Image: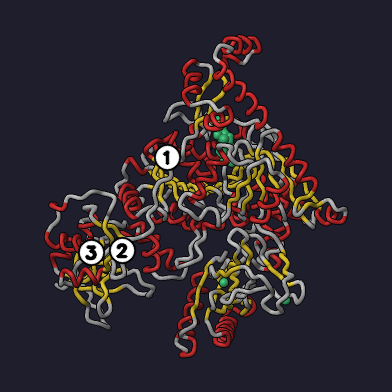
Amino acid sequence: MVYFIDVIIPVPLQKLFTYKISAAEAQFLKVGMRVAVPFGKSKIYTGIVYHIHNNAPVAYEAKDIQQILDDSPIVNDIQLQLWNWMASYYMCTLGDVMRAALPSAFILESETVITLNTVKTFDESILKDDEFLVFEALHHQSTLKIHDISNILDKKNVLPVIKRLIEKDAIIVEEEVYEKYIPKLVRYVKLHTHFSSEKELHNLLDELSRAPKQRDVIMTLFSISAKTKKPVKVSDLANESGASSSIIKALIDKGVLEEYHIQTDRVQYIGDETENSKLLNEAQKTALSEINESFKTHQVTLLHGVTSSGKTEVYVKLIEAVLEKGKQVLYLLPEIALTTQLVTRLQNYFGEQVSVFHSKYSAHERVEVWNHVLRNSAKAKIVLGARSSIFLPFNNLGLIIVDEEHEQSFKQFDPAPRYHARDTAVVLAHMHQAKTLLGSATPSLESYFNAQQGKYGLVEIATRFNDVLMPDIELVDIKEKLKKKRMKGHFSDRLIEEMTETLKEGHQVILFQNRRGFSPIVECKTCGHAPQCPNCDVSLTYHQYRNQLRCHYCGYHAAMLQDCEACGSQDLDNKGFGTEQIEEEVKVLFPDYKVARMDLDTTRGKYGYEKIITALEQQEIDVLVGTQMLTKGLDFRNVKLVGIMNADTMLNFPDFRAHERSFQLMLQVAGRAGRTEERGKVLIQTYNPHHNILQQVSTNNYIEMFNEQMNDRYNFKYPPVYKQIKVTLKHKDYNRVETASIWYAKSLRQVFKENILGPEAPPIARIRNQFHKNILVKIPKQQSLAKTKEAIIKINNSFLSVKDFRSVKVILNVDNF
Ligand code: ADP
Ligand code: ZN
Ligand code: ZN
């Protein structure tokens, strides 16, 4: 009997590849194990066994495999089922899915770069001869590729050696290594509560008259608190009073001053390391029982709860119940940055059972989580992660929570698979017969529509926890303010007033501007010329901090111009504004307060994001200026005022979802204000205060927004009423892509008639020197999705067989966002 295996290889080719194996190998191998296989002339790939059988391939002679890499499967049947679903739903290959799904350390291949593991001191005696050769070579040369190692060992089959070296911690597969962020603890002091009465304080000062230095420290403490109305750091106290740390320590030892760390109470949990979950209030209790009731008839339920309604605590109760049944929980978040706060919160309840998984983790950490999940170990009962965690090898999933389900970052743009993690999660849960809970204060139209149609259950929480009032939202008409000369730069008098008051009270302010840099357009006042990116059809953004002009699409940058490229005039004007400019203006308007900025430019560094969040929590920042990064579910307790600098650019963005998104964005930023006792205030500056979306934001009227937007979606045949697939064609030659897209659209139109839109150039028609054309396929609900895709694939195949079009890149994006 001759044995064969079909193998998935991480390449974008439609089919599986068949290899020959021996009878003994057939005995040993199981579906889901890795094998090293030769591919093409000289390449070696890691493949996943998909099928074991006895049918020789017809079209080619099957090669032998090189090596079996696992003792047991690392991918289970449900995962393979999910990969299949993704490949067919999102119109990509199993290889594309495999590459996205497996941690890179699992996919050793010719291209893999290997370096020494310098973290560990290493005992060379445990290495076998061939392993030692590689290890030693890495002392002369910092990186090696697989084929280098082939040369060193003078054999082809080197993956097993590399695998063993990785397991022995001798080498690592190169990638950006991500270390855990440990926030620094800042020491603060306050007067012991014992001295809070007038009388006790008097006695204390009397007593200290014999110790004037200590007395000075106390007086300085008073004056700092009176001035800043904020917690006093030990370092500030020492600086201002000129006292040595031993004097301050003496006061702490005496019990006059009390020392504390803000980091430890960032989420303000009172209690031990692992504490009991909170008692739910009435609204939360009702929601919880409604969710459980809804799960009896629905596999998916949407929890629509206003910001700060305490959704997380409801999730916690659901998680507890699932854990009791011995099942696993997947907790999906749109962006991993968010986890900083949430991890602490969940670890307080569930301790070690929480694992965090995301692409920024080192290969080692990711493999570790993967293995914990695979073995259903106690350490990974709850996995908290961004979209790629849907790929983990769950075998006993009981619940998936998709928090902030409306977030567009759940959808992967590039590369394939262009999947939506929320929708994929629903499919994955179904395969496990598990439940899915979608949560949001501003649900996507898709999910709310599904709930309205009865496809999903719907549960609502309309009040904030502790009956904190929803923030008071005020619209400021900047056209009016300009006319009356009541603007200073980009700040209206109302915003300045509110900021002044908030800061005086010792509270914090968040300012939102959805554009980074200083100004998006630099324009010559004489001839009107604006510098453009040489690679893309966009004007360059001025970044004052680096005195550069930068392209936000391809990264191109150049020094800021002194004079106009076209006419030489020195009269250059900045149009529009970004976060940098706002930060500058705040510094001038409020010189006594600390301003920081949170956008792509300031969070690039390893811990950029965490540093800013920690600084805000520790009240080292008074005013935080930022882009939409600010909107992400963060819980800051001292923020009382939120200013939205300009609502109009969001609303006017050329996309059918622009209005829905603006609504979500504004309500989410607004939700950062006043999350404790005091009611928050939100000011929205706009040229168009009567815009329906702004009215709906200011009254927190989700339903009105939903109905109105749905109306548009019906009229213009957009999702969620119609499904859609976007076909994008790219080429560096404009004429080529033009002809190709006309051909493509014409072929589609023959099948789908009026449900084809385009070809059209997107708002930015050229990016990285590639011209783009979009064609939209609109798919009515009653039309078969599978048949539609079949037809598109057929057209795509004939397209690719036209010689002139072969070099045109085609991207199929299902449910495009
Ligand atoms: P959401 O996720 O809906 O925005 P959170 O779950 O973050 O809201 O809750 C808002 C705040 O209220 C958090 O600081 C949380 O600790 C607190 N909170 C929520 N529910 C409870 C509860 N049952 N008991 C005590 N505090 C709660
Ligand atoms: Zn000019
Ligand atoms: Zn560019």
Q: The residue tagged with tag 3: helix, strand or loop?
A: helix
Quadrant in which the C terminus is drawn? bottom right
Given this view, does label 3 or label 2 mark the residue nearer the observer? 3
Q: The residue tagged with tag 1: helix, strand or loop?
A: helix
For residue 504, above or below residue 28:
above
Q: The residue tagged with tag 2: helix, strand or loop?
A: loop
- Quadrant of picture, ligand 2: bottom right
Disc 3 to disc 1, C-alpha distance: 53 Å
Residue receiving disc 1: 322
Quadrant in which the N terminus is drawn? bottom left
Residue receiving disc 3: 140
Disc 1 to disc 2, C-alpha distance: 33 Å
The amino acid on which the numbered mark 1 sits, given as a three-letter code, is Val
Residue receiving disc 2: 107
Whether residue 287 is visible here, answered yes or no, is no
Cβ–Cβ under 8 Å for marks 3 and 1: no
For residue 182, above or below residue 765:
above
For residue 126, above or below residue 418:
above
The amino acid on which the numbered mark 3 sits, given as a three-letter code, is His
Q: Give whichever of 243, 715 is nearer the camera.
A: 243
Q: Earlier in the sequence, mark 3 or mark 1?
A: 3
Left or right, residue 459 beside residue 643: left
Q: Residues within 10 Å of mark 1 (few under 14, many from 20)?
A: some
Q: Residue at x 31, y 56 (%)?
A: 76
The amino acid on which the numbered mark 2 sits, given as a three-letter code, is Ile
